[in-house]
């Protein structure tokens, strides 16, 4: 009997990891499509007679940012559509968009076609960033949710790393000016894997309950939880929560409640926080930063590959740590180390003469930044986005928050090279100041959610952001004290 009890959890865990592996093909496509443009742009600046699109610095920015702006729209609208039609249906639609975007961008005949196709591709990227973590969180139990949602972040950084490595390899092996089209076409692979894979994963049980399909939800949870009793308890909690939500108004009327507005602002604030770290400034512009120290172009491109590799390693460590340390301690530790790395980098760029030593010290500062960013902050952000919003409006609120996350991304991507040209290394001191503000924001507004079910988190958030009586505050304090104990 003991052996059977031990085997069941392992079996359920394998199913959940398989589900996460398939769903995060969308995250892999997200990462690849955001990273590959750095390798393709140098070839796209060539004249059309040489196989390029004759891009100028302005049109380079337009091509790069079109995907980011598309991501903002995708995150917002796909989040809402997933509440109506289901997470699984929207994943299939996104897989088709990823595939069409990969083929279309590889065959784009001119600048305007490329911008429009990249915008459409961005819609798929933003949609994936919105619903993949939510879909995984709704299938996973409390003890698996942190690591499984972190798998989404791992696949994002793995996609970026794959883009950097494949672009550099293709450019080295095939001295052909149209090689950039093949770089973009590789994105078809994760799109195809996602489309095929979603036929082998279950629908979100929480979405099924919200649509009144309770028996279907129960069957899915029985296959995903360690025991039938655990599945039955979760079904009861979901039904109770959905019944409460239906009797207290619809989706948009509930957003008028003060605590939900506050919670939405926290979600938006987390999106601003992650972009204010400057992470995408490093991911997009590391070669420019290093070349300003006198490092050669080839060496700078190799360093960009280092960004991808260190990000994957850090994310793997973050997946291991998140259920041990908890969300809040990891987030605060990551922000503190990000500030330290940015102050160090600012000091190196401002107060050292251009030299090989300055180049290596600057690179070390960037890699330390990325290590703590991708180990602590990136994974925790996506986990929190998947779990802090209530079931009935999770798609909408997640869509708004992640949509604005993409807007903040676009602002940083556009403003960074301008700010760097005006203020030089002082730009990193500005980032450090912003991140000190982020530490204060997170310390005041982000409770611990480790080990709690999604229904428990919803109740916790309602108490946290409502006007509490003294007894409510005391109860909340006990809940937080319990949930923040490290395992």
Image (cartoon, grey):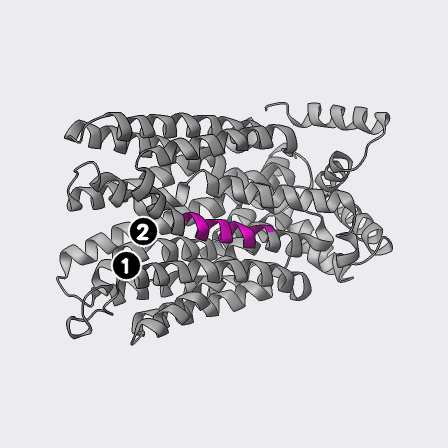
Where disc 2 sits, the SS reads: helix
Query: Which numbered circle lies on residue 127?
Result: none
Where disc 1 sits, the SS reads: helix
Which image quadrant for residue 385?
Answer: top right
Question: Badge 1: few (under 14), some or many (20 or more) residues near its Cα, within 10 Å?
Answer: few
Identify which residue is drawn at 43% across, 28% down.
339
Q: Residue furthest left?
A: 175
Q: Nearer the viewer, residue 59 or 326?
A: 59
Q: Where's residue 350, x and y in %?
A: 28, 29
Residue 220 seen from this side: yes
Left or right: where does residue 392 sit relative to residue 434?
right
Q: Which residue is mark 2?
A: 162
Query: Which numbered circle lies on residue 57?
Result: 1
Depth check, mark 2 against mark 1: the one in front is: 1
On the rendered image, what quadrant is the C terminus found in? Answer: top right
Identify which residue is drawn at 32% across, 51% down.
162
Q: Where's residue 438, x and y in %?
A: 54, 33
The vertical placement of 170 against 339, above or below, is below
Q: Is residue 411 magenta?
A: yes
Residue 228 seen from this side: no
Of helix, strand and loop, which mostly describes the magenta segment? helix
Q: Where's residue 26, x and y in %?
A: 47, 57
Q: Residue furthest bottom?
A: 109
Q: Which residues are magenta?
A: 401-412
Q: Nearer the viewer, residue 353 or 138?
A: 353
Q: Is residue 480 magenta?
A: no
Identify which residue is drawn at 53% across, 28% down.
332
Left or right: where does residue 221 sit relative to residue 162?
right
């Amino acid at each position: 009997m003991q052996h059977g009890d031990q085997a069941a959890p392992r079996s359920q865990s394998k199913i959940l990891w398989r589900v996460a592996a398939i769903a995060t093909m969308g995250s892999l496509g997200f990462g690849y499509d955001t990273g590959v443009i750095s390798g393709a742009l140098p070839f796209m600046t060539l004249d059309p007679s040489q196989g390029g699109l004759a891009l100028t610095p302005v049109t380079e920015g337009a091509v790069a940012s079109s995907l980011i702006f598309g991501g903002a729209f995708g995150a917002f609208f796909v989040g809402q559509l997933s509440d109506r039609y289901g997470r699984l249906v929207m994943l299939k639609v996104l897989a088709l968009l990823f595939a069409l975007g990969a083929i279309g961008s590889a065959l784009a005949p001119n600048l305007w076609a490329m911008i429009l196709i990249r915008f459409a591709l961005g819609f798929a990227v933003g949609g994936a960033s919105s619903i993949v973590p939510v879909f995984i969180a709704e299938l996973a139990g409390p003890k698996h949710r942190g690591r499984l949602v972190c798998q989404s972040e791992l696949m994002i950084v793995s996609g970026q790393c794959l883009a950097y490595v494949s672009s550099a390899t293709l450019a080295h092996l095939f001295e052909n000016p149209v090689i950039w089209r093949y770089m973009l076409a590789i994105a078809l692979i994760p799109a195809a894997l996602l489309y095929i894979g979603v036929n082998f994963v279950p629908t979100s049980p929480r979405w099924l309950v919200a649509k009144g399909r309770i028996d279907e939800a129960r069957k899915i949870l029985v296959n995903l939880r360690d025991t039938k009793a655990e599945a039955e308890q979760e079904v009861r909690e979901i039904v109770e929560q959905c019944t409460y939500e239906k009797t207290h108004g619809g989706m948009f009327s509930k957003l008028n409640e003060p605590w939900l507005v506050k919670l939405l602002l926290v979600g938006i604030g987390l999106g601003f926080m992650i972009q204010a770290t400057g992470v995408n400034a490093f991911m997009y512009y590391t070669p420019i930063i290093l070349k300003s120290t006198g490092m050669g172009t080839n060496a700078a491109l190799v360093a960009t590959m280092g960004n991808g590799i260190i990000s994957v390693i850090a994310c793997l460590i973050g997946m291991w740590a998140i259920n041990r340390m908890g969300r809040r301690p990891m987030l605060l530790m990551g922000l503190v180390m990000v500030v330290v790395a940015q102050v160090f980098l600012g000091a190196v760029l401002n107060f050292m003469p251009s030299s090989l030593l300055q180049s290596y010290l600057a690179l070390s500062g960037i890699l330390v930044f990325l290590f703590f960013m991708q180990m602590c902050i990136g994974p925790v952000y996506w986990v929190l986005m998947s779990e802090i919003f209530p079931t009935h409006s999770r798609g909408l609120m997640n869509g708004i928050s992640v949509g604005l996350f993409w807007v903040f991304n676009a602002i940083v991507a556009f403003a960074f090279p301008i700010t760097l040209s005006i203020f030089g290394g002082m730009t990193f001191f500005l980032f450090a100041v912003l991140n000190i503000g982020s530490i204060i924001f997170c310390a005041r507004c982000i409770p611990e959610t480790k080990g709690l079910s999604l229904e428990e988190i919803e109740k916790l958030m309602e108490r946290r952001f409502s006007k509490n009586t003294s007894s409510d505050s005391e109860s909340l304090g006990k809940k937080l004290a319990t949930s923040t104990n490290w395992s």
